[in-house]
Image (spheres, helix red, strand yellow):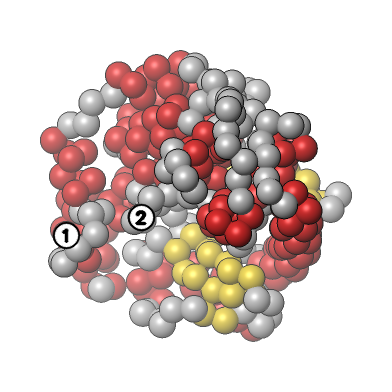
Amino acid sequence: MADPGLLDVIAGWGLPDGVIDHVEPLRVERDLSLVAEHHLTGVVHAAMHAGDLEFDRPDQVDEAYRQAMASNSRLEANLLDISDVLGSAGIDHAVLRGIALVDRAGPAAHRVCCGLDLLVQPGMLPEAVLALEHAGAVRTESVRSSTWERRVAASVPLAKDGDPLNLHRTLAPGPFGFAIADDRVFADVGTFAVVERSLLTLSVEHHLLHVAMHVALARVRPRLGDVRDVALLLSSPGLDADRLIRTVVDWGVSSPFATGVLAADAIGAEANGLVEWARRHRDSRRDRRLRSSYAEGKGQARRQAIATLSVLGWRDRVAFLRSR
């Protein structure tokens, strides 16, 4: 794209403080692949048909959108099969991000999904992986150990019928993930509809926490479609901002949550109480130490292990060390 900041502007289209104004016509050959990489195909398609964005080959944008919606439908069908497999195995699970946000964030999301993410009830990740392997899913990374997956791994990446599938043990990797009370997350869930079926997802507060932390702790620049998800969830009806602030402070995850909220603020999220809180937030020494363990580079695994040990109780420290 001619203007590196243009993608941020597109991500903010339709948000309370987002606007596309005087944007030069985009070129399909140059720009559409980058738009798709950031999961914004649905947004540019809607903005183009609203007359707020111009492409040199609008028919190609229409075709890219058609293919994206066909992919969404395939993912929905795959999700229902996966949910049936886990349900038959007696494994509680909740859908994260992606398809769950098509419903939760509403039509304004213009959400394009590129994979599936599910949170599995605490302690059941190895059993969930095994059940899905029996149903045809394959691992995309080598096995470490069942103890590691039960007690330490943030997620296990799989593929099912050609679609990426991440099974999560917790809402975030590393020390901030261990700070989250997983049992409380599963005790506070909601539902959403897929092809007239009701599936479990997180409460709007925990979903916002998860997506904001996903943006903040990304190893590379987060996809702007994910940042847009944070912005849309910030405007969710029924969001209890005070309760969420108490939760993130209690769990010690204020730093990544505030970072994710500020990323959404930068593309035009509604300036509500959570945004004001994030603007006032200042990282503590502990926050800076834990955040540094996520930095790319030599020794990252060792840094993150040391940081993780610092947030665990003695019993969990022993389990963590034995599982490595």
- Is residue 308 visible to us here? no
Q: Which mark is residue 7?
A: none
The answer to which of 303 and 8 lies nearer the viewer is 8
Image quadrant for the C terminus?
A: bottom left
Choose between 143 and 267: the one closer to the eye. 267
Q: How many marks?
A: 2
In the structure shown, which secondary structural element does the residue marked by tag 1 occupy? helix
Return the x and y of residue 321 as percentages of the image width and height: 21, 68
Q: Identify the residue at the far right of this view.
A: 196
Q: Residues within 10 Å of mark 1 (few under 14, many from 20)?
A: some
Q: Earlier in the sequence, mark 1 or mark 2?
A: 2
Tell whether 106 sits left or right of 166.
right
- Residue 43, by quadrant, is top right
Q: Compare residues 52 and 97 and report the one nearer the observer.
A: 52
Task: Tell me: 265 left or right of 293.
Answer: right
Q: Residue at x 51, y 79 (%)?
A: 139
The residue depicted at 58 percent of the width and 26 percent of the height is 21
Name which residue type carries label 2. Val
Residue 197 location, x and y as percent? 82, 51
Picture disc at residue 220: 2
Front label number (1 vs 2): 2
> Which residue: 53% across, 64% down?
167
* Coordinates of residue 164 in the picture (x, y in percent): 58, 69
Q: What number is the disc on residue 303?
A: 1
Residue 88 horizontal side relative to residue 146, left or right: right
